[in-house]
Image: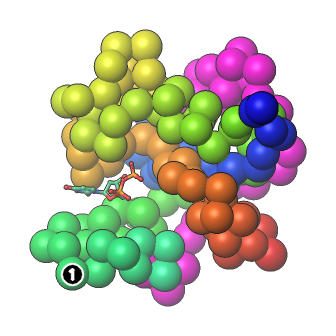
C-alpha cells in the first residue's frame, strides 16, 4: 500500500537564476503532491559538502560545490503518496541527456553539472535531508 511520505526537494541555482521556479513548482503541485515548507536561501559551502559527501572523491566535486553555492536555491519539504519515488520519477535521470521528455530535468536541464533540481533518493535520506536543511 502506498504511504504518505515527506521528501526533500531543492531547486538548484541554475533554475532559480533562469526564473524556472514557478514552472517547476507547478509541475510538483499538478502531480498531486503538496508543498509543506519552502524557503529561498543561499547555501554555505559546509552544508553542500555534507549533503554531497558521497561524491567527495569525484573529480567534479569542487565544481559541484561552487555551483551549489553560486546563488540562491529554493528548498522544500514535499509530501504525498509515495512522495520520494514520485518526485524521482517527475525529476527524471541525473544526466539530462538520459532524462525523458516530460520530466523536469528532461525539459529544463541541459547539463549534468547543472541539472535544475535535487530530490531525496530514499525515505531514509529524505528524513536526514529535511533535518539538515530545515532543522
Ligand atoms: N553531478 C555532476 N556531475 C556528474 C554527476 C553528478 O555534477 O557527473 C552532480 C549533479 O548535480 C547531481 C549531483 O552531482 O545532481 C548528485 O549526484 P547523484 O549521483 O547523487 O544524483 P541525483 O541524486 O542528484 O540524481
Q: Which residue is mark 1?
A: 57
Residue 68 vs residue 118, the one in the foreground: 118
Res 93 seen here: yes
Q: Is residue 55 above or below residue 30?
A: below
Image quarter of the C terminus: bottom right
Where residue 131 appears, x then y in whole percent? 74, 72
Helix or strand or loop: what does disc 1 sit on? loop
Residue most toward the bottom?
Answer: 46
| Residue 101 image point, x, y percent | 34, 14
Give the vertical position of 10 relative to 109 (above or below): below
Query: Left or right: 63 with respect to 4?
Result: left
Q: Quadrant for ligand 1?
A: bottom left
Q: Is residue 6 above or below residue 124?
A: above
What x and y, as percent, mark residue 86? Answer: 61, 31
Total marks shown come to 1
Q: Farthest residue toward the left?
A: 59
The magenta stretch spans residue 27:
yes
Residue at image position (27%, 33%) is: 96
Can you give x and y, in whole percent of width and height, for residue 133 in the image? 69, 69
Quarter of the figure with the N terminus: top right
The stretch of residues the image draws in magenta is 20-49
Residue at screen point 42% across, 63% down: 68
Is 47 contained in the magenta span? yes
Q: Is residue 12 left or right of residue 126?
A: left
**For residue 78, side relative to residue 73 (left or right):** right
Front one among 67 and 90: 90
Amino acid at each position: 500500500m502506498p504511504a504518505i511520505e515527506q521528501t526533500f526537494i531543492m531547486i538548484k541555482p541554475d533554475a532559480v537564476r533562469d526564473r524556472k521556479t514557478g514552472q517547476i513548482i507547478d509541475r510538483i503541485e499538478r502531480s498531486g503532491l503538496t508543498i509543506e515548507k519552502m524557503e529561498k536561501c543561499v547555501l554555505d559551502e559546509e552544508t553542500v559538502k555534507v549533503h554531497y559527501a558521497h561524491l567527495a572523491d569525484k573529480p567534479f566535486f569542487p565544481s559541484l560545490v561552487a555551483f551549489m553555492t553560486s546563488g540562491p536555491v529554493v528548498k522544500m519539504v514535499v509530501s504525498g503518496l509515495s512522495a520520494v519515488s514520485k518526485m524521482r520519477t517527475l525529476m527524471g535521470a541525473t544526466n539530462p541527456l538520459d532524462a525523458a521528455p516530460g520530466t523536469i530535468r528532461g525539459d529544463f536541464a541541459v547539463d549534468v553539472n547543472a541539472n535544475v533540481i535535487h530530490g531525496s533518493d530514499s525515505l531514509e535520506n529524505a528524513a536526514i535531508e529535511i533535518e539538515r536543511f530545515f532543522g
